[in-house]
Amino acid sequence: MLAPRWCWTTAPTTAVVAMHEALSQARFEQEVAAIPPAICNTRRWKIHQAAFPIFDVEFQAADGDDRPGLRLRMDFSDWNELPPSIVLLRPDGTVITQILPPRGGTGVFNAGPHTSFARPFICMKGSREYHTHTSHTADLWDNYKNASGYDLGGIITQVWKAWQKDRP
Amino acid sequence: MSEENHTEAELQTTSGNYPEKGGEFDKLPSKQLISEFVDKAVKKLKITNTNGWILTAAGKTVNPAQTWEQAGYAGAKVVLDYGPDHSGGGNA
């Protein structure tokens, strides 16, 4: 019987680890490069950082909308063997530690606490915090990682669309 | 031929723009189905799977099964945004 692929029969060599990280970085950089500036302008996305493994993007409100924007600090370490870990930030870069409980909206912005930490999180397929929550550990990332809408741009798009409907 | 007979369109995705350079538009017959333009753009951008994606323009959903004219874009310049909708929260 084959061992599950996450079980190493011997410790992975430094070379294997380095190759895995290089592949992860190459995929990240390719997907970041594909995002055209035009769509960032249209969607009002401000990219604060796009250096592997971090993608830090701010969703800015439309003109005439005085609600605050939202920043996501997304950690794409081990992309795409793992989904990104996402931290919610205010536009000034400080971590959001409290949001109002969801009001029956999308349910994507969860007030927390998570089973592993005590702050709000993105509870959506494609976020590491969703797949590691004890309620969803059976819903494996492997079932989505090559599906439509679960590349880097697709996951950001999904969160952005939820934010438009249900701002935390 | 009147400008009303044409629509100028651009498609934006996180995998690229069509036409490739942002701010460029394809001039299309207003009686053409929107899906024809979208299909051409998706093929050009080498996007292999668009299951669950939705088409919007200025925040409003656009039905690709309509013609540009039926959708109210005859004679207009339109930027289409194409991408996945959010999958819904886990309600953990």
Image (cartoon, coloured by chain):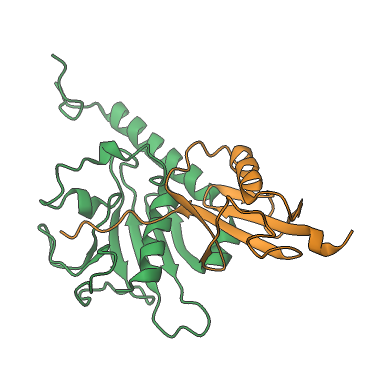
Chain colours: A green, B orange
Residue A3 sits in which quadrant?
Answer: top left
Residue B24 sits in which quadrant?
Answer: bottom right
Residue drawn at x 37%, y 70% as measured from the top left:
A165
Q: Nearer the viewer, residue A61 or B88?
A: B88
Q: Position of residue A158 (x, y in %)?
A: 39, 57
Q: Position of residue A115 (x, y in %)?
A: 10, 58
Q: Residue furthest right?
A: B1
Q: Is residue A65 left or right of residue B16?
A: left
Q: Residue furthest top?
A: A1
Residue A68 sits in which quadrant?
Answer: bottom left
Q: Position of residue A18 (x, y in %)?
A: 33, 33
Q: Is residue B34 left or right of residue A16?
A: right
Is residue A131 shown above or below A98? above
Number of numbered discs: 0
Q: Nearer the viewer, residue A86 or A148?
A: A148
- Where the N terminus of chain A falls, by quadrant? top left
Q: Nearer the viewer, residue A76 or B33?
A: B33
Residue drawn at x 39%, y 75% as measured from the top left:
A91
Q: Is residue A158 left or right of residue B32?
A: left
Q: Position of residue A39 (x, y in %)?
A: 56, 60
Is residue A18 shown above or below B86? above
Is residue A155 shown above or below A142? below
Residue drawn at x 34%, y 57% as measured from the top left:
A74
Q: Residue furthest front?
A: B70
- Where the C terminus of chain A falls, by quadrant? bottom left
Residue drawn at x 64%, y 51% as measured from the top left:
B34
